[in-house]
Image: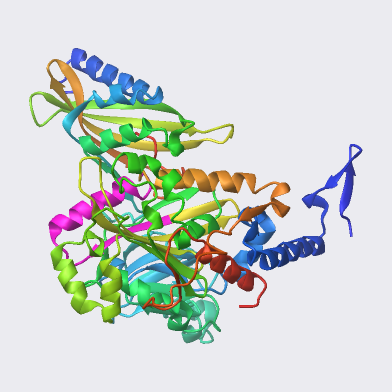
Amino acid sequence: MILYQTTFGIKGVSNVTLSVGDRVNQVEQLLRRVKQNIDEGRVPAKIYNDPDIFELERERIFGRAYIYLGHESEIPHPGDYMVRYIADDNVIVVRDEEGQIRVLFNCCRHRGMQVCRAEMGNASHFRCPYHGWTYRNTGELVGVPAGKEAYGDVLDKGAWGLRPVPRMEIYDGLIFASLDAQAPSLNEYLGGMTWYLDLVTKRTEAGLEVVGAPHRWVMDANWKLPADNFVGDAYHTLMTHRSAVELDLAPRDPKFAMYGVHVHAGNGHGLGMISAPPGMELPPFWGYPEEVVRALQRSYPRPEQVEVARRINFLHGTVFPNFSVLNVMIAKDHRSAPTPMLTFRVWRPVGPDRTEVWSWFLVERDAPEWFKERSYQTYVHTFGTSGVFEQDDAENWRGITRVARGLMARDHDLNYQMGMSFLKRDPTWPGPGEAYPLDYAEANQRAFIRQWCEYMLNEA
Amino acid sequence: MVGISEEVYREVRDFLLREAELLDNGSYRDWLDCLTEDIRYQVPVRVTRDRGVESEFVNEMGHLDEDYVSLEMRVMRLETEYAWAEDPPSRTRHFLSNIRIEPGDRDDEVRVKSNLLLYRTRGDDPHYDLLSAERHDVLRRVNGQWKLARRLVLLDQTTIGTHNLSILF
């Protein structure tokens, strides 16, 4: 085992000379450290920037978990398709002529060229530009140029269709896929989180629709940082988003995001639901227009969901590993009243220190037009590529990623202890999961890290 | 360049260069003075489409979709002590070229197209981001001064290669 190398007479640890075995040991050691220390609320910063950890994540997290690909409303018509990713795997999400949604690996069966190079469109067939193999939008191979001459009668077209991803399931319009054929059902995977997703997806009969196309941008930050932020971090709003508080885009009280319920919904999924701060009046049901509020009282599956939603003004959450939801009531500018808006996120990992953000804006299809417009403006001004809240989040996640690159980060524990000793579960909470009566808490973040650890150590 | 005098061309060019200078120098309040109160400022999302499709731009969704009040809000934010994304500030450089001017829909307006190369760097990181775009502007003469009444920024990237758009085009 080569642990030390002498270069110019200086002894030091160098990744370059570590053998593969050493590197595996180092990752294993780090993961054991995470697993041991998480119960004490300690997490080494290194997990937020390490090439070996990242390699293992690609395999053990993104090769197994359910990954959000998009919303049904993005491909409403037969033949509509969109190209999406599961980490590095490029897939076509397409609605076939019978209306069925399929997720196909974007890779020709002959020599592996991408058969679809636009990001979205409408097609009855996908034709590979390399040799012309042509597939129906079901994935079925229907055309092989000069097939008779080149293959005689031996090519079994039925066996060489575009390959569907091993698992694809849809929950209320949300399209998820897993590369693991042994993955549990999506319902089992989402577990208690569906009860909370319903609050967002089931407000009206017609349900949600994506407006336009997602914002996509890359940031030099690790994918787990935004996932951690959305899963439970109400605490950051008081400093990160202080500018928005000063401009009256959010409630005047910088600690407004404390006054909520913090829920670990199981399997690493978590969310927070924030209400009006004491002494402040905020409208019920996020301030949605009366048409939507009337609809949700009929549309939610359970009466308890209506009661929970009545007190929500701000909702944030993450479905493990990298799908997040933000549904908040904020103002589009300093002269406007707060308006609810909804955004979905995918934090697509592209490197240990690089994430591609996918940010969708959604609104109820049957909401009044004036509201859709206003909610859209609120989204663009506050979140998404240029949003004044979003901008400052990116700054923090980049900085953390940057310092986590070094050697000190390996045994440099970050504090994950918020709420650990004194915040007690609320036994009266009507929804599933473990609920805490304060959103300044880190139970969700700890649960997320535990789940991450289990996947990484192959114990999930 | 039918209907555009040399003088107008020079004035418009000078306006665009001065406006770019204000942005690069962080003189945002002075920049706001370059805008009409009814300005519409849009940076639509772009999506890769097959050649046959008329436009890659998504009208319903912008990276920025602003009016005067929201641009003012962005400037006010930078004036708070908590605009972390721009404190320390990005260093930007707007490079303008290929300026083309046509008569506008109104007598007091002109339509201006320009190419923009926007350089951005932050902190001590030697890496930089480059954003390239075609801008479609409408300039209006108000009390003898040119003002920006409309800006449409047609970006060349579909996935934006910088960590946020806390900068302006």
Q: Is residue B74 left or right of residue A217?
A: left
Q: Residue A178's x, y, as percent?
A: 50, 75
- The residue positioned 31% from the left and 32% from the top of the image is B76
Compared with B145, A37 (above or below) is below
> Which quarter shows the N terminus of chain A?
bottom right
Front in this rendered view, residue A111 or A311: A311
Q: Residue A16's x, y, as percent?
A: 79, 50
- The residue positioned 45% from the left and 47% from the top of the image is A393
Let me know if residue B81 appears in the view: yes
Q: Does the magenta stretch include residue A380?
A: yes
Q: In this view, does A164 lie to the left or right of B3?
A: right
Compared with B19, A9 (above or below) is below
Q: Which stretch is magenta?
A: A358-386
Q: Residue A66's x, y, as percent?
A: 49, 73
- The residue positioned 37% from the left and 40% from the top of the image is A243
Let me know if residue B155 appears in the view: no
Compared with B36, B10 (above or below) is above
